[in-house]
């Protein structure tokens, strides 16, 4: 099983700031990496797939990069609606696994 | 509009069984892989099971393999999860999810979830 490790666990930032979230895979997943955003009481929302392709209707301030074992999600100019929990997920092989999440808090 | 509506969640004793259902609408059901993904309270999502378009391929997470069975009825646009030998650690909100596009096992559409609680 591929273990996905996200860091940091929590980030406290202010609106307007730029943030980079990290996700590391225990072995290479190529570019088979997705990012999700989840707000309280809601299902996860797909942001990025293929490590760097934005999903439909996702604002351009969200960008993903990386390949192999190291990935990042960058959010430029944080908006109030961006404060949530973010998860990475690999889909390179079975079993599919998620990271434990990074919580983005308002400072 | 894509809609996924889960049902069947309940409080069940450890060792018991439950069958979850998901009614899909707003897309051509037969063209997509479908999945169950669960989320325990305060935890991240956990992939449970995956089924291909015609039901001939099925995959399971290690924690549920041999106890859970995924199936689909394409005539009814429905997805199912038969859960047997339930454990306390199976307690979670169970989401029905559709892969985002024709290829790639990541999910662009999710239901609202149905709660399964395994407790005595």
Image: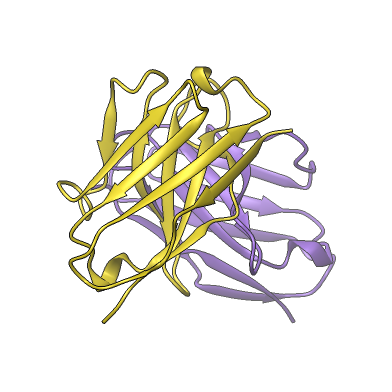
Q: Residue at x 28, y 30 (%)?
A: B58
Q: Is residue A34 left or right of residue B67?
A: right
The tally of labels here is 0
Q: Is residue A43 at least partly visible in the picture?
A: yes
Q: In this image, A57 relative to A99: left or right?
A: right
Which percent across, then down, holds residue A79? 83, 62
Residue B96 point in image, percent of width and height: 49, 45
Q: In the picture shown, does residue A61 fall above or below B14?
A: above
Toward which corner of the image does residue B79 lie, by quadrant? top left
Q: Colour of chain B?
A: yellow
Residue occupying the point 25% across, 58% down: B17
- Colour chain A appears in: purple
What residue sits 53% from the left and 20% below the top?
Answer: B102
Looking at the image, residue A41 sits to the left or right of residue A87; the answer is right
Q: Residue at x 54, y 56 (%)?
A: B113
Residue B114: % across, % down: 50, 59
Q: Is residue B100 depicted above or below A39 in this figure?
A: above
Compared to residue B31, the image places residue B16 above or below, namely below
Looking at the picture, tell me which residue is in the foreground, B37 or A55.
Answer: B37
Q: Residue A105: where, in percent of width, then height? A: 68, 76
Looking at the rendering, in which quadrant would you find the C terminus of chain A? bottom right
Q: Vertical placement of B114 versus A55: above or below?
A: below
Q: Is residue B21 left or right of residue B82?
A: right
Q: Is residue A51 visible?
A: no
Q: Residue furthest left?
A: B66
Which colouring convention does the figure follow? by chain
The quarter of the displayed image where residue A16 is located: bottom right
């Amino acid at each position: 099983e591929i273990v996905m490790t996200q860091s940091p666990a929590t980030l406290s930032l202010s609106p307007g700031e730029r943030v980079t979230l990290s996700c590391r895979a225990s072995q290479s997943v190529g570019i088979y990496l997705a990012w999700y955003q989840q707000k309280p009481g809601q299902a996860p929302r797909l942001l990025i797939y293929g490590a760097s392709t934005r999903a439909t209707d996702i604002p351009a301030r969200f960008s993903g990069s990386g390949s192999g074992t190291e990935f990042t999600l960058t959010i430029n100019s944080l908006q109030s609606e961006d404060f949530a929990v973010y998860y990475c997920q690999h889909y390179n092989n079975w079993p599919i696994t998620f990271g434990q999440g990074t919580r983005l808090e308002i400072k | 509009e894509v809609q996924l509506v889960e049902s069947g969640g309940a409080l069940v004793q450890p060792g018991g069984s439950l069958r979850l259902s998901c009614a899909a609408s707003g897309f051509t059901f037969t063209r997509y892989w479908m999945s169950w993904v669960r989320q325990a309270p305060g935890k991240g999502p956990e992939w449970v099971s995956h089924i291909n378009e015609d039901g001939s391929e099925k995959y399971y997470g290690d924690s549920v393999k041999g106890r859970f069975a995924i199936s689909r009825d394409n005539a009814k646009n429905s997805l199912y999860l038969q859960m047997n030998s339930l454990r306390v650690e199976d307690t979670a909100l169970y989401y029905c999810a559709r892969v985002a596009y024709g290829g790639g096992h990541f999910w662009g559409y999710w239901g609202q979830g149905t709660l399964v609680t395994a407790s005595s």
